[in-house]
Image (cartoon, grey):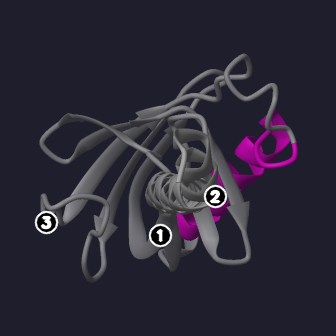
Amino acid sequence: MSYVDRCSTNAPSYSLKWRYMLKSRLLTIFIFLVMSFHANSGGSTFPVKVIELRNTETEFKLIAKVVGKFNYDSSGCEIISITGNYDSEKWKSYVNLINRSLHIEALGILERASRTQSLVNFGYIGAGLKKNGECKYESKGLFHDENGVFSIYENI
């Protein structure tokens, strides 16, 4: 058998092995990418009782007692303090999710819960809060849906 014959008969098996390896690696990369996006875009809620809510035209400060388990981080906070504002520049590409009107409505929900001393679900989406100290957090905007009021800090 000549050198050319050996190369031509081995070429298809080499090509199939290479394709299989490439597909396997691409599938692995795809799975890792999907898992990492899922981990960063999650969110959760937990019931709170609003102790204090201060709201000005540009900023808000929420102090709330967590009823049950605070599931944002492992701090185990019973009372959380959240300061923030609506960052219109940051969210200009996300107007279907968060906008100034939804932010004001979410503050209204928290205000009613404070007045009536009722529980409200408070939560986060993605990295929805930035930790600024022990049980102190920062928000760049609030929105709401049927599950509660959500904080958002980082782009999704």
Q: Which comes before the other along the chain, label 2 or label 1?
A: 2
The residue furthest front is 1
x then y, percent, for residue 101 = 84, 41
Along the line of sight, which residue is nearer the eye, 98 or 47? 98
The residue furthest bottom is 68
Q: Mark 2 points at which residue?
A: 12
Judge whether 28 appears above or below 60 on screen. Answer: below
Residue at 40% in and 43% down? 129
Q: Which comes before the other along the chain, label 2 or label 3?
A: 2
Range of magenta residues: 96-115
Residue at 59% in and 35% down? 155
- Dot 2, crowdedness within 10 Å: few (<14), some or many (≥20)? few
Q: What element carries label 3?
A: loop
Q: Name the residue under label 1.
A: 44
Evaluate if marks 3 and 1 touch, with contact meaning CB atoms under 8 Å apart: no
Q: Estimate the spatial distance between the alpha carbons at disc 2 and disc 3, rounded to whole Å.
A: 60 Å
x then y, percent, for residue 47 = 42, 77
Residue at 70% in and 60% down? 144
Amino acid, disc 2? Pro
Q: Is mark 2 on a helix, strand or loop?
A: helix
Amino acid, disc 3? Gly
Q: Mark 3 points at which residue?
A: 76
Evaluate if marks 2 and 3 touch, with contact meaning CB atoms under 8 Å apart: no
Instruction: Examine the image and state in which quarter residue 58 appears.
Output: top right
The residue furthest top is 89
Residue 55 within the segment the image draws in magenta: no
Along the line of sight, which residue is nearer the eye, 87 or 28? 28
Q: Is mark 1 on a helix, strand or loop?
A: strand
Residue at 73% in and 77% down? 146
Residue 104 within the segment the image draws in magenta: yes
